[in-house]
Image: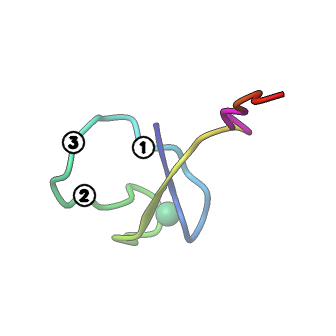
Amino acid sequence: MYRCANCGEPDKNEYGDRAHQCDKCGSWIFVKERPSEKKVLKSD
Ligand SMILES: [Zn+2]
């Protein structure tokens, strides 16, 4: 899931690594949305 870095509009389509543009603001910058999905490795 990608989200526009400018206006925060979620990207509806999955384009993989192809360039895509925001419907709302026309921005080409998208950020991958990962809601606090951090892998914690327990080593002890
Ligand atoms: Zn946008």
The residue that disc 1 covers is: 11
Crowd class of label 1 (few under 14; some 14 to 19; many from 20; radius 10 Å) = some
Considering only order in the chain, which callout, 1 or 2, is on the residue closer to the N terminus? 1
The residue that disc 2 covers is: 20
Res. 8 image quadrant:
bottom right
* First to last magenta residue range: 36-40
Residue 27 magenta: no
Q: Name the amino acid type tagged 2.
A: His
| Alpha-carbon span between mark 1 and mark 3 | 9 Å
Q: Secondary structure at mark 1?
A: loop
**x, y (%) of residue 26?**
37, 70
Q: Secondary structure at mark 2?
A: loop
- Give the residue drawn at x 46%, y 36%: 1
20 relative position to 5: left or right: left
- Where residue 15 is drawn, which disc sits there? 3
Image quadrant holding the C terminus, namely top right
**x, y (%) of residue 37?**
67, 34
Q: Secondary structure at mark 3?
A: loop
Residues at circles 1 and 3 in contact by the CB criterion of under 8 Å: yes
- Give the residue drawn at x 60%, y 40%: 34
1 relative position to 19: left or right: right
| Extreme-left residue of the structure | 18
Prevailing SS of the magenta stretch = loop
Q: How many marks?
A: 3
Considering only order in the chain, which callout, 3 or 2, is on the residue closer to the N terminus? 3
Q: Is residue 37 above or below residue 22?
A: above
Residues at circles 2 and 3 in contact by the CB criterion of under 8 Å: yes
Of 18 and 24, nearer the camera is 18
Residues at circles 2 and 1 in contact by the CB criterion of under 8 Å: yes
- Where residue 34 is drawn, which disc sits there? none
Residue 38 magenta: yes
Res. 30 image quadrant:
bottom left
